[in-house]
Image: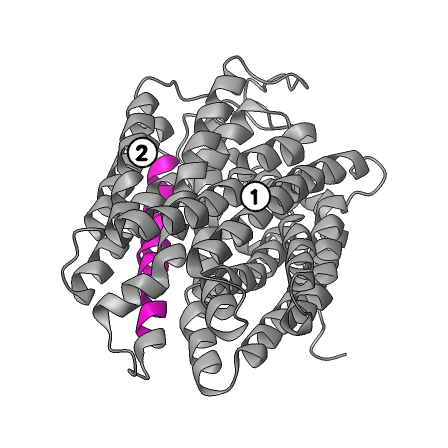
Amino acid sequence: MSSPLQTVQETPLQNTPAPAPGARLSLTLLLSINMFNYLDRYVLAAIEPAVQKDFFAPDDPKAEFWMGTLATAFIVSYLVMAPIFGWLADRMSRWVLVGISVILWSLATGASGLAGFFTMLLITRLFVGVGEAGYGPSAPTIISDLYPVSRRGSVLAWFYAAIPVGSALGYVIGGVIAKHFGWRAAFYAVVPPGLLLGTFCFFMKDPPRGQNDPGAHPSGRKAGLKDYLVLLKTPSYVLDTLGMAAMTFAIGGISFWIPKYFVDHRHAGDLAQVNTTFGGIVVVAGLLATLAGGWAGDKLRAKMPGSYFIVSAVGILMACPFVIAMLYAPFPWAWVMVFIAVFCLFFNTGPSNAILANVTHPSVRATAFAVNICAIHILGDAASPPLLGAIGGRVSWNAAFIVVAGVMVLAGVLWFVGAKYLQADTEHAGRLPEDRPNSGFPVIPLSK
């Protein structure tokens, strides 16, 4: 029986280096939404100490663990729902899914401010995760269909540049509003922009899937099981996902606990001051690094086929000594260490996501991003906030952040290993399953 993908093999698309019509408008809207995506996430991190004081006694030894579960609740619903929305995004209008998702998470964020007890707050964070799960797999695939392979590193870097900007705004806006109007007002403030951006999505048109992929063909097809199983046989996809999981563990833990650590244990200032300083560092260092990493990956691609992996690995390994240095350096030098660490951590953002787009078939690309989201959060920031909170509360916060540095080394090693597979996996991405190699992983004989 023929693959469901074979029906469209008759008319290959002409691949051109130019972006598709409407690419810039789509990128601008998706970038803006992504900024509010991360703003919504990190408002909670900014106001965590104030929320904790409302719901827990000052001497409660389990308070930090339970506060960490708020991040975990968001991540769990996000990763559970992402594969479902990814499957839908491969079959229906991605812009409609994005619009519904943005409106849902915006309303859920506002509902967080209405929580009268901790369990209600936990439930609202679950719904924020559901909303963001509909957005995560769809957005990068829309961009991938609008821009050619040779430009995806830098273009996706622009899209993901919204992460440091949105995260920083979450810290700054959350901290400032909470200081003057209370922590509940910080949740309310992000609702109107989210509703407006979500509404715009319903007026956008989906680009044809695969129109900018070499060897791919016009979509409208439905993938079968073996098309999805190809993901597990693609070394670049598997190694990139594992490396991103380790990186997500590190960033998730650091971003959630840094304000508390600097306020309560390093006495760097009050919560508003620390959030403003840390937010400023994240937006400047993260923005510069994200754009520079995407540019470097694209520029080196012609000379170094595994450039996206190598750029990612070098960046995260360079971050490790500065994460440790921030624990011991006196202020204001500790802030310098944070700046360099954040810069190096965000350097991989564009290249690592470009790998996902370039080594997956257009018909399953949204699902591929969804599976990646699921994996990196299960292995990454679903576990790191409560785990690091437990280590910080029972051992020391220095020990917790040293664990983070060790996980970052693991990410660098995985990405270096992936570099040798990238060129072949990119060339095979547009092929039908039966035309691809069985596996790019080395085969180890069990006997002579």
Look at 53% across and 12% down and name the residue there: 21
Relative placement, left or right, of 125 versus 21 is left
Q: Quadrant of the C terminus?
A: bottom right
Q: Nearer the viewer, residue 367 or 158?
A: 158
Over which residues does the magenta segment extend? 66-90
| Residue farthest along the top direction in this orientation | 21
Indicate yes or no whether the magenta region holds residue 282.
Answer: no
| Residue farthest along the bottom direction in this orientation | 395
Indicate yes or no whether the magenta region holds residue 67.
Answer: yes
Residue for badge 2: 194
Locate residue 429: give its quadrant. Answer: top right
Relative placement, left or right, of 220 versus 439 is left
**How busy is the neighbourhood of tag 2: few (under 14 within 10 Å), some, or many (20 plus)?**
many
| Residue farthest along the left direction in this orientation | 116
Locate residue 12: give its quadrant. Answer: top right
Q: Amino acid at mark 2?
A: Gly
Percent coordinates x, y for residue 421 in the rendering: 72, 51
Give the spatial CA distance, label 1 vs label 2: 20 Å
Label 1 vs 2, first from the N-terminus:
2
Relative placement, left or right, of 189 versus 414 is left
Is residue 355 positioned above or below 51 on the image? above
